[in-house]
Every structure is written in C-alpha cells, then in structure tokens.
Image: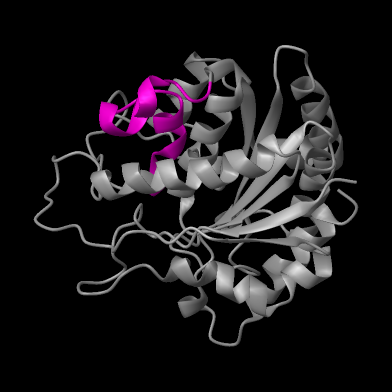
Amino acid sequence: MRNIVVVDAPSNLGLRPPAPGTVPGCYKLAGALRENGIVRRLGAFEGGVVVPPRYDRGDWREGDGVFNAAALASYTVRLADRVQHHVAAGDFALVLGGDCSIQLGAALALRRLGRYGLVSVDASPDFRNPDNSERIGAAGGEELALATGRGQADLTDLEGLRPYLRDEDVRVFGTRDGYRDDPQLVQLRELKIPVVTVADLREWGAAELGAATAVSLETPALDGFWVHLDADVLDPEVMPAVDSPDPGGLMPDEVTALLRPLVRSPRCVGLNVTIYDPDLDPDGTAGALLTDLVVAALAGA
C-alpha cells in the first residue's frame, strides 16, 4: 500500500467573485474536509499547505485574458513543486482545493516527471478557450484547455513544457447532458477526447467505466495518471454548495463507483478535490458527504 499524503491547495484564484466585493469561498474546502476527519480516516500523512497569493483582480476587464494570471502562474509552479515531490517519492497525493485551476499544478508537476494522463470528473468540460469562446477570464472554467496547451502562454507554457497533457491522454466524465451541443464539447469531440455524460455513465455503468478507463490508462506509453474531482459533478440535491449547482448531476454512489477503480489503480498517482464552498453549506451536510465519498473511494488505495 502506498502512503496517502494530504496537501492543501486553498486557492480561489480561478473563479469569478460570487458578488461584488466578495471572494469565492472554495478556499475553505480543505479545512472543511479536515474537520470531517479525512486525514485520520484515511490514515494519511500530512503534506502541509501551499498558500496561494491574495485574490485581487485589480483593474481586469472582460477581454483582458485570464484574470489573476500572474498569481495563478506563480501558484501553479509552487503547487507543482509540492506535488512532484510526493509523486516522485511514490506517494499518492490527495490535493484539497480550491477551485479547479489547482489542477494546473498537478499537470505541471506530472509533465516534469514524464507523460501522464488525466481523468476529469466534472459537471462541465472546463475546456473554454479562445477557439470556442470569447468569454475568457476564469481559469477555473478553463483549466483543461490550459493544461492541453490552449490559451495564453504565461499559463500554458510554464517552464517551456507546453502542453502539460496530451489530448489523447485525457478522459472526461460526468458532463451534464445539456452540454451536448456546447462549443466546448463540440471541440472535444473534434479532438477525439472521450467525453462521458451523465446519461452515458448511467447507460454503461459507473464501476464498469471506471475499471475500463483505468485499464486504458495503464499503458506503457504513460507513466501514470491523475484524477480531478469537481464537487459540482454531484447533483445539487445532495451538493448545493458549489458555484454552479446545475440539476441533472450524479449521485454519491455513482461517483464513488466511478472513482474507486481509478484511484485504486497502481498507476494512479493522485487526486484533487475542488469547488465545494463551505460558505454555501451552513450546516456542513454537503461537506460531510464529500468527505465520505472521497474516503469511500480511496480506502484501500
């Protein structure tokens, strides 16, 4: 059994403010899951905190590219340093976000080490880029595009390592069925990046898809793979505490069944958890559920 090491990445740099004068509360995710005993319940080791820069969009305006870009770039490098250290040591890195832009830290770390795949479990593709949208700005909705080399160079080409992920090494799960005609999905299909919607997953079976995907990524061409979990993949009936609680999501047992064969693969080197916002969960119910889900998937990994 590998050591599970928990690293906090409490960055909210990639999200738009929920209201004027406020900042996204997802930076409290790690603290909430820790309060629910995630480290103790997993028998995990302490990996510390990678403290993000201050959230400050300054005089950014629509059309200026990704906001907080300089802060995101510096944070991605520092988070990559921490993730790289643990993956190189043979540990399983459990990174608690934060918004989805923290996935760039994992992607950069793994690119330094070799060639790795990604399984993204998310309600939206997070593939917004200049080829399919004019509304570029929030890296938390663009991290998959950025990681595959699409977008501004100060985020896509850190250390001259663009792209951090190859298109053919990416799998996308849990996309809402309403996205089927979205320009992001149209582009993903054109690129032949596999996308499994909620309806697809229910038709084919979560556990079966998870197992088959793990096998597909256990190829000699790859050094391993990473899993990205956005809490908004869950239906708002059980996970309302996210910035975009769209109906038609997965239920906890479906997400657990999908994740379990992935994170238990010996070739899976880590998992990041993102987007849950404790500010939107006054009684803590959603945070407890998310903790239970992650523990259930990882126990025995």
Q: Quadrant of residue 119?
A: top right
The one nearer the camera, 44 or 252, is 44
Q: Quick check: 209 left or right of 280?
A: right
Instruction: Estimate the x, y position of residue 157 in percent, counting from the top left.
Output: 35, 25
Q: Is residue 56 magenta?
A: no
Q: Is residue 162 magenta?
A: yes
Say above or below: 213 vs 101.
Answer: above
| Residue 178 visible | no
Instruction: Estimate the x, y position of residue 203 in percent, counting from the top left.
Output: 78, 37
Residue placed furthest toward the top? 221
The one nearer the camera, 249 or 163, is 163
Figure disc tally: 0
Instruction: Estimate the x, y position of residue 21 in percent, counting from the top left.
Output: 20, 74
Instruction: Estimate the x, y position of residue 62 in percent, counting from the top left.
Output: 14, 46
Q: Residue at x 77, y 53 (%)?
A: 4
Q: Quick check: 12 left or right of 113?
A: left
Q: Quick check: 207 left or right of 62?
A: right
Q: Quadrant of residue 148?
A: top left
Say above or below: 60 vs 24.
Answer: above
Q: Residue at x 77, y 13 (%)?
A: 220
Residue placed furthest toward the bottom? 283
Q: Residue at x 71, y 68 (%)?
A: 291
| Residue 253 visible | yes
Q: Quick check: 235 left or right of 58?
A: right
| Magenta part of the chain | 140-165
Q: Residue at x 70, y 75 (%)?
A: 288
